[in-house]
Image (cartoon, rainbow, N blue to C red):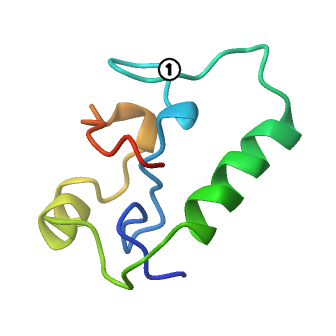
Amino acid sequence: MPVHPHIYSNGHICLSVLSSGHGGDYSPALTAASLALSIRSMLASCTSKERPPGDREYCSRATGRSPKETRWEFHDDKV
């Protein structure tokens, strides 16, 4: 598992195009290629090898839950 500020240690990825909930940018019109490009761009733009803030707390609350059940707060407009 990559160490990245938008990837939790349980594998959940905080990226707006992967979320259709509050603040998410997912659209059924997105292709698999465009989603893969978004993830690749997110990984390539990483400037610090660290876990997201609150990683341990989030992972303890999200055990056994789908990322779809998470209300993400998207605040990093650089990704």
User: In the depicted view, which residue is nearer to us: 26 or 69?
Assistant: 26
Horizontal placement of 75 versus 39: left or right? left
Quarter placement of the N terminus: bottom right
- Residue 76 position in % (x across, y down): 32, 46
- Residue 72 position in % (x across, y down): 29, 36
- What is the three-letter code of the residue carrying label 1? Ser
The quarter holding residue 53 reads bottom left
On screen, residue 49 above or below 70: below
Badge 1 local density, few (<14 within 10 Å), some, or many (20+)?
Answer: few
The residue wearing badge 1 is 20
Q: Residue at x 22, y 68 (%)?
A: 55
- Residue 13 position in % (x across, y down): 47, 54
- Residue 78 position in % (x across, y down): 42, 48
On screen, residue 43 above or below 47: above
Q: Residue at x 39, y 60 (%)?
A: 6
The quarter holding residue 45 reads bottom right
